[in-house]
Amino acid sequence: MTTRINPSILAADFANFERELGRIANADLAHIDVMDNHFVPNLTFGLAMVERLQQVTPIPLDLHLMIDDPDRWAPIYAETGAYSVTFHAEAAAEPVALARRLREIGARAGIALKPGTDLDAYLELLPEFDQILVMTVEPGFGGQSFMPATMPKLRRLREAVDASGLDVWLQVDGGIAADTIAIAAEAGADTFVAGSAVYGGEVPADRIEELRALAAAHAH
Ligand SMILES: O=C(CO)[C@H](O)[C@H](O)COP(=O)(O)O
């Protein structure tokens, strides 16, 4: 199984994202947390910033939209050339139509499930998505503790994806670090978002290699 490490720039120096993206040149994708202070109680940045980030890095962008009304906004973000666009299940009025629109535009379509989001309603939608983001903390802030209680959901998803034969990536986000990544890898994650664990290190690129090796060693 291919393992991917997507550093979250939420933990980077907001005064210099171009330099901070340069420090993670060995990342698989750069994870970009867009928060609107409505869907989550925190505010980061919006469309203008994402457009600018696209211009200053060759790393494909993995957009995580923690916003209300993704039906309106997610396609506009996809049109920036984002590699993947993930919206939250509860935020979308028509998740399937939205996922199809994102794919039409050329982005990979992702759906995010908060720790309390029931998986049952979404399992049958697997063919509509390229990735499922299992939040391993409550969305909104970096630096929180990994929630092992989210692992049964990830295991069920891994079983469903393997049984389907679909190439749907299973992403985890929140509290992923050297001491937790093995738990998520063994439960079936193949794509790992890490903010504090990457940018908290003196050399973020080294932290990426360390996390990648641990994930590969414990791959499902
Ligand atoms: O989506 C997020 C918060 O909502 C962040 O991507 C996530 O929390 C990463 O930060 P850390 O690795 O520091 O936990």
Image (cartoon, rainbow, N blue to C red):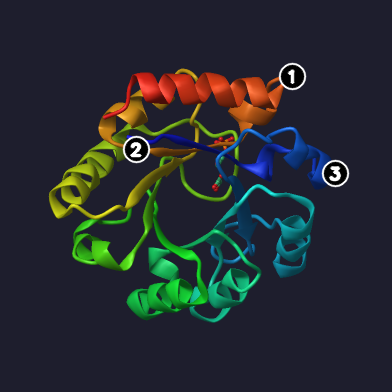
Which residue is disc 1 drawn over?
A: 202
Label 1 SS: loop
In the image, residue 92 above or below residue 5: below
Query: What is the CA distance from the residue labelled 3 to the residue labelled 2?
Result: 31 Å
Give coordinates of residue 117: x percent, y percent: 32, 56
- For the residues labelled 3 and 1, say whether their Cβ atoms are less than 8 Å apart: no
Residue in the picture at 37% in, 59% down: 130
Q: Is mark 3 within 8 Å of ligand 1?
A: no
Which residue is disc 3 drawn over?
A: 16
Residue in the picture at 19% in, 65% down: 124
User: In which quadrant of the rendered image does the C terminus lie?
Assistant: top left
Give coordinates of residue 182: x percent, y percent: 37, 22
Sort mark 3 into few (<14), some (14-19) or many (20+) by Cα contacts within 10 Å: few
Q: Of the residues shown, which amino acid type is indicated by label 3?
A: Asn
Give coordinates of residue 159: x percent, y percent: 17, 44
Viewer-side residue, 24 vs 42: 24
